[in-house]
Image (spheres, helix red, strand yellow):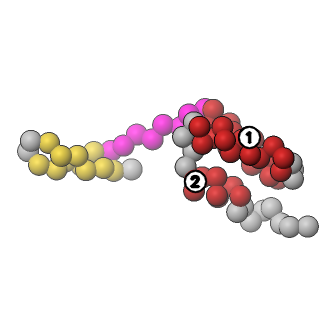
Amino acid sequence: MKAIEENARGPTLTLLRVKKHPVKLTALLYLREALLRERYERCPEFIRIAKEWGAKGREIEELLEDARRLPR
């Protein structure tokens, strides 16, 4: 990811480092497993934890809209 920063000499282009916190990643993995196993009562807790540790809405939406989960 790139960002433009302002300094005394004008704008400069820098690279942003995206941190992937292990708690966030684990919560997203557990959310995915709960969805695949149709254990929907567990999903709100995993979503809350993932958001608390920095998960973006689009990361959660991608799991919720996964095409591999077909309605029965």
Q: Residue furthest top?
A: 22
User: Is residue 25 at all visible to an observer of this figure?
Assistant: no
Quadrant in the rendering for residue 68 = bottom right
**What residue would you read off at disc 2?**
57
Q: Residue furthest left?
A: 9
Which residue is depicted at the point 74% across and 65% down?
Answer: 67
Q: Tell me the element at label 2.
A: helix
User: Is residue 48 at all visible to an observer of this figure?
Assistant: yes
What amino acid type is highlighted by mark number 2? Gly
- Where is residue 3? Give x, y as percent: 30, 50
Q: Which span of residues is magenta-colored?
A: 15-22
- Where is residue 24? Give x, y as percent: 61, 37
Measure the alpha-carbon separation of dots 2 and 1.
Answer: 15 Å
In the image, taking residue 13 as reference, residue 60 lies left or right, namely right
Q: Residue 41, relative to residue 24: is it above or below? A: below
Q: Residue 52, relative to residue 6: is it above or below? A: above
Q: Which mark is on residue 45?
A: 1
- Where is residue 44? Give x, y as percent: 74, 46
What amino acid type is highlighted by mark number 1? Glu
In the image, taking residue 42 as reference, residue 21 lies left or right, namely left
User: Foreground residue, 49 or 36?
Assistant: 49
Work out which quarter of the rendered image holds the C terminus and state it: bottom right
Q: Is 58 contained in the magenta span?
A: no
**Pointer 1 local density, CA inside 10 Å: few below 14, some 14–19, many at least 20:** few
